[in-house]
Image (cartoon, rainbow, N blue to C red):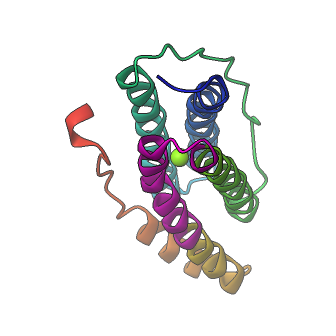
Amino acid sequence: MLSEKLLDLLSKQITDEYYAAYLYLAMSATADKIGLKGTSKWLFAQAQEEMAHGTRIFQYVLERGETPSLGTIAMPPASYANINEIFEEVLAHEQKVTKAINTIATVAMQEFDHACYQFMMWFVDEQVEEISSVSDVLDKINMIGDHKAMLLALDNELGQRVFVHPFPEQA
Ligand code: MG
C-alpha cells in the first residue's frame, strides 16, 4: 500500500521519466542530423536509461500492490540549433527531475514510508551522477567554443559511451 499522495507522485514520475526518454531521443535525432554521431549515441544511451528508470518505478508501484495511472507523454521539442543548446536543455531537465525526485523522497519521509524513502535513495544518488556528468560535458562544450576539431574530438569521446542497464533483472 502507498498513500494516495505518493501513488500520484510516483505515477507522475513514471510519465516524466518516459518523457525524458522521449526528449533525449529527439535530441539524439538532432545530433545525428547535424553529423555528431557520437553525441547522438550518448543521448540514445541516456534515453534508454530514462526508460529503465520509468520502468523501475512502474514495477515498484506494482510491488507495493498499487496501480499507477499512466499520463500523457508530451511531444518533445523537434530540433535544436547546436550541441550547446542540447546540453543546456539536458542539464535544465535533469535539475527539474532532481527536484521531483527530492519531493517524492521528502513526502515518503514525512509519511514515515521508510520503504519508499529507501527506494527513492537510489534515484537521489543517480541524480547526483546525472548532474555531474552532464555538467562535465557542458563545461567541455563551453571550453571548445567554435573550435570544430575539438568538437569532433568531444563527439568521439561521447560516442564511447556504452549503455549499461541500471537494473539488469529488468532487461
Ligand atoms: Mg531519470
Quarter of the image with the C terminus is top left
User: In x, y percent, where is residue 151?
Assistant: 59, 74
User: In x, y percent, where is residue 112?
Assistant: 54, 45
Locate residue 35: give its quadrant: bottom right
Residue 115 in magenta? yes
Q: Is residue 171 visible?
A: no
Q: Is residue 161 visible?
A: yes
* Left or right of 154 in this view: 77: right
* Residue projecting furthest to the left: 169
Dominant secondary structure of the magenta stretch? helix
User: Which of the pair 49/120 is nearer the observer?
Assistant: 120
* Left or right of 131 in this view: 72: right
Check the image and report above or below for 14 versus 67: below
State which region is magenta. Answer: 108-133
* Residue projecting furthest to the bottom: 143
User: Which of the pair 16/147 is nearer the observer?
Assistant: 16
What residue is at 62 percent from the left and 73 percent from the top? 135
